[in-house]
Amino acid sequence: MTERPYYLGIDLGATSVKAGVVSAEKDLKATFVVDIAGKDAKEVLEAIFTSIRRAVAKAGMTLDDIAAVGVASPGPLDLEAGVICDSPNIHGWRNVPLSKLLNEELGLPAILENDANAAALGEYHHQADPRIKVLAMYTLGTGIGGGIVIDGKALHGAQGNAAELGHIIVEPDGRQCACGQRGCAEAYASANSTAARAAQALQQGCESSLSQVLRAEGALTAKDVADHARQGDALAAKILDQSAYYLALLSVDVWHVVDPQRIVLGGGMAQAGDILLNPVRKHFQQLCWQLQGTGGIEIVLTKLGNQAEMIGAASAAALAFGR
Ligand SMILES: [Zn+2]
């Protein structure tokens, strides 16, 4: 039998499927993206197969060169059975045995991974740093996805629900979270929360250059808040600093549980860059327990950007089926 040193990573997003061919060294060889906005369940499955075949062809390979497939998907998932229990984005996707369907269609072993765990796996394994044994990651978007990787493996917990870092409570009796709890990190530091808190402050009469954006667009984004903070708007800077404060508070909690050497800020809001990262670092230093010191921990921005889930899905496949 020939060597099969490549893995396929699939990122099953809300509006697109991204497939990537990744080497055993975690180098990305080729990608192919298929739009799935508005597509039904059957069309989405076809889109996944198409993205895989086109990515493999683009890499100048055939399926014979591929060892296994990993899929990063939002939950809830049955990781052991390889089943997507319910999809927040795809209408009619309930109890879809995706690992089995991929195996039947492609003749390759397949595995599912939670999208935020996959992103953390991607950041851990891509250009792996041998010093890093424990890594935690937040994907800052509509909500906050969380992933923890220890000694190269994603932390799943007893029922696959570990590392839901966005739902760690940072403010008792605080803002309502979509999960039903109050005061979750997600309700304070996600991209959506950052935009919503800015809009609320404007409605309460705060002065800001953001009010022109709200009037013109009818809504704000976290990018608006970051852009206006960068331009010196005081309210935007305050709102972004609050988000950073809550991410730092979350990081102190995460630090005391798993003692990570690296915490990665990812997802769309990480594109804000240093204007978000620097205050997270500053608040973390001020908040954390100083006795032990924090010399061993670094808080950084994502290296892989929106390819983290896809590359990490390939890592999950390599972990499950690699030699
Ligand atoms: Zn929550």
Image (spheres, rainbow, N blue to C red):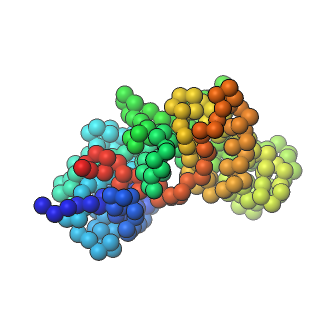
Of residue 152 and residue 266, the one placed in the foreground of this image is 152
At horizontal 19% and vertical 65% (from top left) the residue drawn is 64
Quarter of the rendering occupied by the N terminus: bottom left
Quick check: 194 left or right of 99? Answer: right
Residue 248, located in which quarter of the rendered image? top right
Of residue 221 and residue 139, the one placed in the foreground of this image is 139
User: Which residue extends farthest left?
Assistant: 1
At horizontal 35% and vertical 54% (from top left) the residue drawn is 314
Quick check: 50 left or right of 35? Answer: left
Point out residue 206 in the picture as x, y percentages from the top left corner: 85, 46
- On the question of residue 222 being in view, the answer is yes
Point out residue 106 in the picture as x, y percentages from the top left corner: 21, 59
Above or below, 127 relative to 177: below
How many discs mark residues in the rendered view? 0
Residue 61, located in which quarter of the rendered image? bottom left
Residue 42, located in which quarter of the rendered image? bottom left
At horizontal 35% and vertical 61% (from top left) the residue drawn is 22
At horizontal 43% and vertical 38% (from top left) the residue drawn is 150
Of residue 24 and residue 136, the one placed in the foreground of this image is 24
Of residue 288 and residue 99, the one placed in the foreground of this image is 288
Above or below, 20 relative to 200: below
- On the question of residue 144 being in view, the answer is no
Point out residue 136 in the picture as x, y percentages from the top left corner: 52, 41
Point out residue 158 in the picture as x, y percentages from the top left corner: 37, 28
